[in-house]
Image: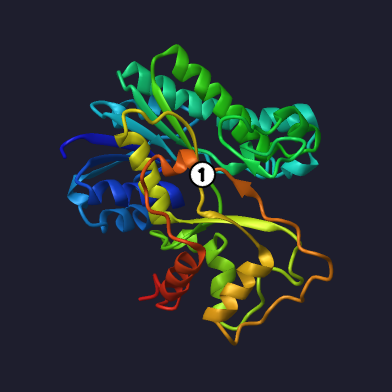
């Protein structure tokens, strides 16, 4: 395996997992992060197995030309740097913005960043791109009992009217990327994850949920919720997610959107599974109303990629056992 791939956002939670998986398969990886001179970040990446085949580059997604060097000579780009933005440059929360400000400060920078990377990739002759997006782009109105990646899109205008600019970003970005890929003969796959369990690669990832709240519970602290919410959550193990990205790259017929989750479970079932593994944990108060049905997914497209996906008991157990080793504490 002597091909080189580019991972934009190599120090992120998803990006670093893609780097790890790609190196383990024998790929050479050009990884980008905003500042490749930050020792605390790059040292952890260079500790990965196979890192003799890893080269890191500084690149800011607001300047597409920053990616030229990292993309040169590569076979594909994985775009995993489009992290959710919840506040504008002046610190105003996205949910407090009016339409014009929300679009300008929350949506447009991410869309422009994605398009800048795709344009740079096209300039360097790349014909394969895989983008990390989110299941938040697949919530049609009215809601459906079982959703799929082809037919079901969030309505970005309705999202914006509801001040859900962060969620709308994914919808707008995906549609722009699909148009560009079609016009420029790029085989584009978009992976749609949420709820990332497993093992983090950088200490800064420990601030993310579920690592943060599971760590708190392990140490005898409060769970994520005071009362069990009458809602569901989706999840996936980071290794399985990274394997979905690589499968979408390696399969010459893979194109379009793919769910990147194991499934969705009601929060009362999530907490019940936690309690099996942590019998002394503090539990949230039980909810009083009848439980709503979890989000339903059609996984036929995801399964066509041929990746084995851990179920929730397995991914939760692996996450908790890893956290109990006190990772990153010397």
User: For the point 55% across and 29% down, which residue is it?
Assistant: 174
Position in image of residue 114 (x %, y %): 49, 29
Coordinates of residue 101 in the picture (x, y in percent)? 74, 30
- Categorize mark 1 by other alpha carbons within 10 Å: few (<14), some (14-19), many (20+): some
329 or 285, nearer to the observer = 285
Residue at disc 1, secondary structure: loop
In this rendering, the count of numbered labels is 1
Q: Nearer the viewer, residue 68 or 305?
A: 305
> Which residue is rendered at x = 66% and y = 82% of the image?
282
What residue appears at the point 27 percent right and 29 percent down from the top-left corner?
75
Q: Is residue 194 above or below residue 75?
A: below
The quadrant holding residue 214 is bottom right
> Which quadrant would residue 309 be assigned to in this image?
bottom left
* Residue identified by numbered label 1: 299
* Left or right of residue 227: residue 23: left
Residue 10 appears in the figure: no
Direction from residue 158 to residue 57 in the image, left or right? left
| Residue 285 appears in view | yes
Q: Residue at x 39, y 15 (%)?
A: 185
Quarter location, residue 244: top left
Residue with the most extreme left position: 2
């Amino acid at each position: 395996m002597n091909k080189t791939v580019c991972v934009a956002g190599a120090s992120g939670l998803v990006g670093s997992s893609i780097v790890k998986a790609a190196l383990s398969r024998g790929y050479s990886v050009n990884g980008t992060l905003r500042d490749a001179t930050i020792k605390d970040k790059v040292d952890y990446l260079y500790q990965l197995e196979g890192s003799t085949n890893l080269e890191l580059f500084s690149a800011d997604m607001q300047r597409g030309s920053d990616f030229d060097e990292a993309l040169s000579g590569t076979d594909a780009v994985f775009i995993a740097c489009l992290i959710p933005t919840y506040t504008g440059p002046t610190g105003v929360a996205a949910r407090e913005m009016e339409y014009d400000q929300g679009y300008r400060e929350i949506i447009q920078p991410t869309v422009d960043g994605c398009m800048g990377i795709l344009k740079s990739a096209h300039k360097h002759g790349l014909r394969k791109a895989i983008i990390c997006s989110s299941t938040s782009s697949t919530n049609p109105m009215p809601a459906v009992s079982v959703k799929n990646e082809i037919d079901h899109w969030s309505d970005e205008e309705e999202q914006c009217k509801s001040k859900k600019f962060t969620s709308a970003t994914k919808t707008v970005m995906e549609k722009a990327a699909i148009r560009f890929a079609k016009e420029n003969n790029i085989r584009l796959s978009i992976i749609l994850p949420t709820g990332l369990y497993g093992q983090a690669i950088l200490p800064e990832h420990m601030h993310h949920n579920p690592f943060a709240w599971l760590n708190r519970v392990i140490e005898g602290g409060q769970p994520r919720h005071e009362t069990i919410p009458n809602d569901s959550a989706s999840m996936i193990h980071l290794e399985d997610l990274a394997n979905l990205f690589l499968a979408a790259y390696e399969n010459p017929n893979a194109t379009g959107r793919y769910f990147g989750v194991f499934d969705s479970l009601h929060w009362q079932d999530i907490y019940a599974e936690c309690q099996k593994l942590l019998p002394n944990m503090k539990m949230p108060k039980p909810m009083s109303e009848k439980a709503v049905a979890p989000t339903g997914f059609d996984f036929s497209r995801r399964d066509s990629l041929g990746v084995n996906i851990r179920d929730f008991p397995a991914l939760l157990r692996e996450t908790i056992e890893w956290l109990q080793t006190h990772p990153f504490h010397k």
